[in-house]
Amino acid sequence: MASSANCVIREVTKDVWTFSCPFARFGFIPFGGRSTAIKMQNGDVWVLASTPLTAETKQKLDEIGPVKWIVGADSVHYLYLDEFKKAYPQAKLVAEKDAIKKQADTGLNFDGAWGSDPAGTQYGFESDIKHCYFSGFKNKDVAFFHPASRTLIEADLLFNLPATEQYSKTNSSGKLPVFGTLNPYMWLHKQFLWGLGTDKAAMKRDAKTVADWDFERIIPCHGDVIEKDGNKAWREAYKWYLN
């Protein structure tokens, strides 16, 4: 579970904010956690909700504008959707179908479900943010692209560890045990992504869709933001699928 304290809130670029918090997988592997908020052209706010809705997080979101969209990134990033929806009951909630099933006992009403909805379904934020559902990925992730800032936002499709920013307010370095790092240019990262591809043809299709987007920055849920050459990093991480 992500820590509700020691989060770093910052405007990464115009109209894009990150909420970076400590998060240890299995209680000891420092992956870091991150939510991302985007102020859309009409003033509405879109949030990928993956960290606790702390008082500081809510204060910043309320400063940015009215939260109208809350999205879950994949089948496993769903723990805080309930918190966000209760705080912003008028916001539309969209998540992956397996994540929705795991939330069945919360009574949440979802306005869309990746994996159940027909391919090409529009949810209402596409004028500002594009999305690609990775049906062939184990965690059923969705990649999001904000053309105005040339930013890709994703959860488990790409890691950039250690989680330096996410652990910057703690006594931990955020480095992984043994390996220390896991970034898109490492062979281990390619192997990791290949192993999580349950449908290689679908992975090749969707990896290419994202590679064809014109992004410079990648905001991952786990690890530091990649500020430059993000498309190059993506193509390197997914080289086994793209070549």
Image (cartoon, grey):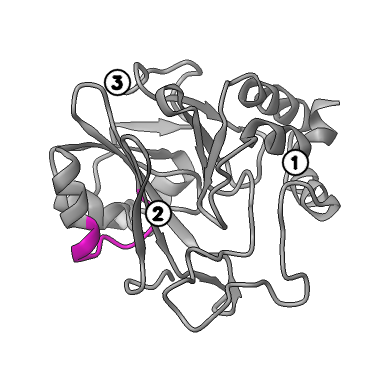
Q: Which kind of residue does numbered mark 3 sit on?
A: Gly
Distance Cα–Cα, label 1 vs label 3 = 30 Å
Picture coordinates of residue 116, whole percent (x, y): 46, 29
| Secondary element at tag 1 | helix
| Secondary element at tag 2 | loop
Picture coordinates of residue 77, whole percent (x, y): 46, 53
Query: Which mark is first along the chain, 3 or 1?
Result: 3
Q: How crowded is mark 3: few (under 14 residues within 10 Å), some or many (20 or more)?
A: few
- What's the residue at 84%, 35% (across, down)? 240
Prevalent SS, magenta region: loop
Query: Which mark is first along the chain, 2 or 1?
Result: 2
Q: How crowded is mark 1: few (under 14 residues within 10 Å), some or many (20 or more)?
A: many
Residue 213 visible, this angle: yes
Residue 52 painted magenta: yes
Residue beneath disc 1: 237
Range shown magenta: 49-57
Query: Camera-side residue: 142 or 169?
Result: 169
Q: Which kind of residue does numbered mark 1 sit on?
A: Ala
Residue beneath disc 3: 124
Residue 50's disc is: 2
Picture coordinates of residue 174, whole percent (x, y): 58, 72
In this rendering, which labeled residue sits more in front, label 1 or label 2?
1
Above or below: residue 116 compared with residue 212? below
- What's the residue at 50%, 48% (across, down)? 75
- What's the residue at 71%, 64% (across, down)? 181
- What's the residue at 56%, 64% (across, down)? 163
| Secondary element at tag 3 | loop
- Dot 1 and dot 2 residues touching (CB under 8 Å): no
Residue found at the far bottom of this picture: 171
